[in-house]
Image (tube, rainbow, N blue to C red):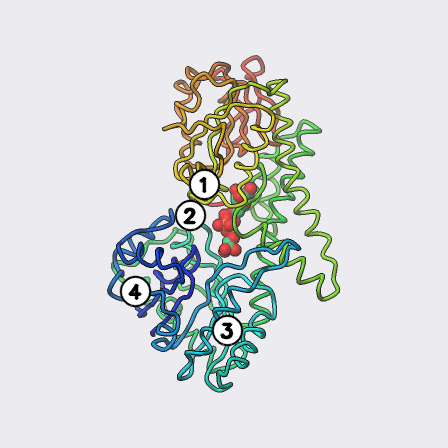
């Protein structure tokens, strides 16, 4: 099928490349001429596993880039809207980019097209898109609006696209539903997975993935409800971790005990410094705003957000508890991205903490495997950027782990011990087993687990956190 994807941010770029991989002819549209030129010239603007390979495979063949929205719409049978939906100051989703794209699409419709929302949007956005198309002279029988939310995570977006728990399509009539079915047919009939060059998936992947068809309104709501639920799980375990701290229990053990109940499950129960990123914080606010607008005060979401903010304060308290005064202290910070596997620092709790520590008068030496370039533009003064974790730790009063990068869970502990001025580690992501750290001579603070010191190295070994499939 000929597909236009409008917006070449994380969602649009990955989805566009993946549609091309499924065999469709894709035009990726962006109004940022420079971005289009970069993509045309072979550049990859974001750090995302397997994306460079997919772009190299299809660029200039089944995948082209353009700044011409009208031209792309004219040539395509389906148009995916994947532009940004930032938060307004009141927490609602700002849909002005979506509206302006819808106006652009209306003026180019020359035959039947399916217009598909791919960005996360509030319920009833599809209805608004339909009205905008009609107001801008599109004929009612020349288009349908569908919702096809994605559940890709940054860092594993390509694999998440091909191996989803489900494909969700919201369509209010059979013609439009049939077009969406066709787009995903090679996944739902399993033929994509039999290709020798198919992107390999995780062992536990559900192949072929189920296709869930709903109304457009339900699909829009499912996406917000999922993200809010996942954020709630994180805040829940963070609250449990605070209770563990207060009573001397071990949250890692509590989590295992909870997660083995199949109704709860172990995923998204890693305590830490709170969730961040371009999705959860924005989507929770938008979901709350949608509910409020329709007369429902979703107070549970207020509490999820409050606990999330509080985690940073908890962590800061832990640093103070370890070092007493902060002014003039030199701290090594591992991790700036909002989570491991990405260079994205949007709403990163790690960045927020670095800013709080700078305010307290600390000197920071930071290292992140992918996000330093972006962080450098944001954190102008007072931060040194190191070439590796050991360089960051040289002469530091303590080592702080703020992002769950896999490489931070595999540090050479002897080497690290030799670098630090004081062997103090404050781990905001529970990447290490406390007993091991104590046995290596560290004073080790983590989230929701007892303090481990060389003096109390006999702390019962508790499993460290596994990275990768949270
Ligand atoms: C999230 C959802 O997981 C995706 O399903 C969804 O498609 C995406 O938002 C979106 O709406 O586009 P993402 O923002 O990439 O994906 O990141 P997650 O892997 O969900 O992590 C979000 C944050 O929660 C990170 O800061 C991470 O460190 C934190 N987290 C995650 C925890 O603190 N504990 C956990 O157990 C899991």
Cα separation, mark 3 vs mark 1, equals: 33 Å
Residue under label 3, please give it: 146
Nearest-to-viewer mark from 1 and 4: 4
Q: Is residue 417 left or right of residue 75?
A: right
Q: What residue would you read off at disc 4?
A: 64
Q: Quadrant of the N terminus?
A: bottom left
Label 2 and label 1: CA atoms lie apart by 8 Å
**Residue 100: image x %, image y %?**
50, 69
Q: Earlier in the sequence, mark 1 or mark 4?
A: 4
Q: Which mark is residue 85?
A: none
Q: CA distance from mark 2 to mark 4?
A: 23 Å
User: Which of the marked residues, 2 or 4, is nearer the chain's N terminus?
Assistant: 4
Does residue 297 appear left or right of residue 270 in this picture? Answer: right
- Please identify the quarter of the rendering in which residue 234 is found: top right
Asked if 412 appears above or below 49 in the picture, the reply is above
The answer as to whether callout 2 falls within 8 Å of ligand 1 is yes
Report the Cα–Cα distance between label 4 and label 3: 24 Å
Name the residue rendered at 27%, 66% in the picture: 62
Residue at mark 1? 340
Sequence-first tag of 3 and 1: 3
Q: How many marks?
A: 4
- Give the residue at x 41% y 15%: 418
């Amino acid at each position: 099928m000929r597909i236009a994807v409008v917006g070449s941010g994380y969602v649009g770029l990955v989805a566009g490349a993946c549609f091309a991989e499924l065999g469709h002819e894709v035009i990726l549209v962006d109004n940022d001429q420079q971005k289009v030129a970069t993509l045309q010239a072979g550049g990859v603007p974001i750090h995302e596993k397997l994306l460079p390979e997919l772009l190299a495979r299809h660029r200039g063949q089944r995948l082209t880039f353009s700044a011409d929205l009208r031209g792309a719409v004219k040539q395509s049978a389906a148009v995916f809207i994947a532009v940004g939906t930032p938060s307004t100051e009141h927490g609602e989703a700002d849909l002005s980019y979506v509206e302006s794209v819808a106006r652009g699409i209306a003026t180019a419709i020359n035959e039947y097209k399916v217009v598909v929302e791919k960005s996360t949007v509030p319920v009833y956005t599809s209805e608004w898109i339909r009205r905008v198309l009609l107001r801008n002279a599109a004929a009612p029988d020349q288009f349908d609006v569908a919702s096809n939310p994605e559940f890709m995570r940054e860092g594993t977006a390509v694999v998440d696209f091909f191996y989803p728990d489900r494909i969700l399509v919201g369509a209010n009539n059979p013609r439009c539903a049939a077009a969406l079915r066709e787009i995903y047919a090679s996944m739902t009939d399993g033929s994509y997975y039999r290709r020798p060059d198919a992107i390999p998936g995780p062992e536990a992947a559900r192949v072929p993935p189920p296709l869930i068809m709903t109304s457009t309104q339900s699909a829009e709501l499912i996406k917000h409800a999922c993200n809010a639920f996942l954020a709630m799980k994180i805040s829940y375990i963070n609250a449990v971790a605070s209770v563990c701290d207060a009573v001397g229990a071990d949250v890692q053990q509590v989590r295992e005990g909870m997660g083995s109940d199949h109704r709860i499950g172990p995923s998204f129960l890693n305590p830490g410094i709170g969730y961040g990123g371009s999705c959860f914080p924005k989507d929770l606010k938008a979901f709350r705003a949608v509910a409020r607008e329709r007369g429902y005060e979703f107070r549970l979401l207020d509490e999820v957000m409050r606990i999330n903010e509080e985690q940073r304060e908890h962590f800061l308290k832990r640093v103070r508890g370890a070092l007493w005064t902060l002014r003039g202290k030199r701290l090594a910070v591992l991790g700036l991205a909002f989570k491991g596997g990405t260079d994205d620092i949007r709403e990163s709790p790690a960045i927020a903490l670095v800013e709080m520590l700078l305010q307290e008068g600390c000197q920071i030496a930071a290292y992140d495997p992918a996000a330093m370039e972006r962080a450098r533009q944001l954190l102008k003064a007072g931060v040194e950027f190191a070439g590796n974790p050991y360089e960051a730790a040289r002469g530091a009063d303590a080592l702080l782990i703020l992002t769950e990068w896999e490489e931070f869970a595999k540090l050479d502990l002897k080497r690290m011990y030799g670098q630090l001025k004081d062997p103090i580690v404050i781990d905001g992501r529970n990447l290490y087993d406390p007993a091991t750290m104590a046995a290596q001579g560290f004073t080790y603070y983590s989230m929701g687990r007892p303090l481990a010191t060389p003096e109390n190295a006999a702390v019962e070994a508790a499993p460290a956190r596994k990275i990768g499939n949270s």
